[in-house]
Image (cartoon, rainbow, N blue to C red):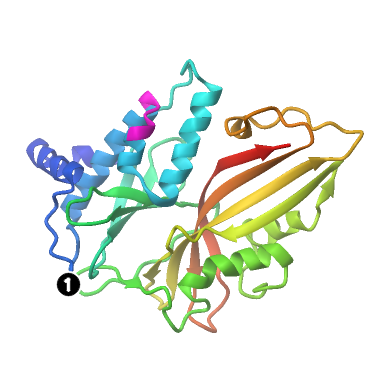
Amino acid sequence: MRRISRAVPALALSLALAAAASGCVSVDGENARVAPLDEREAAGVLADFDARNNEVYAKRDAALNSAIETGSVGAIDQASLRVMEFNDPERKREIPAFTHDNPTYWIPRTVGWPKWFAVHNTPSYANARPMLLVFTKDGPDAPWRASWGPTLRAGASFPEPYRDKDGHVEQLPPDAPGLAALPRDTAAALTGYLTDGRSSAELFAPGPHTSEARKLREEPVQNGYVRQFVDTPAAQYEPLAIRTADGGALVLFAVTHSMKLTVQPPNTLGQVEPTQRAFLAAEPKRSVTEHKLAAYAAVVPRAGAGQVQVVAIMTGVVGAEGE
């Protein structure tokens, strides 16, 4: 697969990386509707991110990670680094370096800040599925940082984005009309359905993150344990809606899934998961509550044109408590 770093001459790449790292790409976008960068500059941002991201995991460097990531990606990966450090303090486990290959750039024209662009790509590690990596820039002097990164589930695909005559994609507002669901309401619709099985049940197509996830919540008692779920929109991560070629939208949104596992006597809780132990002050005896952050990508069709399909996800444990 073609690597970004080999597709750009050395001098041009050095200049692009310097601009990307410093956040000095010139954008007069406070009041005018402009693209924040071109594809050559976006390739530089991606190449710089790949190099620094591999350094993060080689050194377990949480500070560097916060410099290149934000939003749901940053929260999930910060927690992942904490888990890795807790479970492998001697750093015997090596994380193979990888790049985001075969990129297709989705660059919008927007007014004001933040600016963003997305990269449809396939990571270079074995058995990788395509993903959408979104970069965000909070102001003229701010750096580009990765903010969303959902990976396609098996058998799913991202829709083609709408592009104007110059090839730019279009961001939709949170209250965009004419869709099966408002982008700003998608997270609440999903959590409502997962909570009671009735709210917005007809809105979502069956799948692992909808009907199958709901089924787990309908079976609270299993093998001597009681499972309690709380699903809430992660409102601190503002959803991103991108217009698709068929008039619908691809909506990126985040949800927190919390599950409390309580043991029923005479059973014992046993050893908790390694991903949970990193967040616990002591070994729990009666129950453990796990908090997962999930960043979804959902295809939202035009109103009356079908059901919402959740096609991609990035998820990770971000906290836990025990009793």
Task: Tell me the residue at 62%/32% (across/down).
Answer: 280
User: Which quadrant of the structure image shows residue 46?
Assistant: top left
Q: Is residue 203 visible?
A: yes
Above or below for 155 versus 66: below
Quarter of the image for the C terminus: give it. Answer: top right
Q: Nearer the viewer, residue 186 or 5?
A: 186
Q: Residue at x 18, y 48 (%)?
A: 23
Q: Is residue 61 shown in magenta?
A: yes
Q: Position of residue 295 (x, y in %)?
A: 49, 54
Helix, strand or loop at label 1? It is loop
List x then y, in percent, for residue 86: 53, 25
| Dot 1 crowding, Cα within 10 Å, few <14, some 14–19, many 20+ | few
Residue displayed at 87% across by 40% down: 264
Q: Residue at x 41, y 44 (%)?
A: 74
In the drawing, does residue 192 fall left or right of residue 116? right
Q: Residue 38 location, x and y as percent?
A: 17, 58
Q: What amino acid does circle 1 point to?
A: Asn
Q: Which residues fall within the magenta stretch? A: 58-63
Residue 299 to residue 222: above or below: below
Q: Position of residue 60 (x, y in %)?
A: 40, 27
Residue 44 as seen in the image, left or right of residue 246: left
Residue identifier under label 1? 31
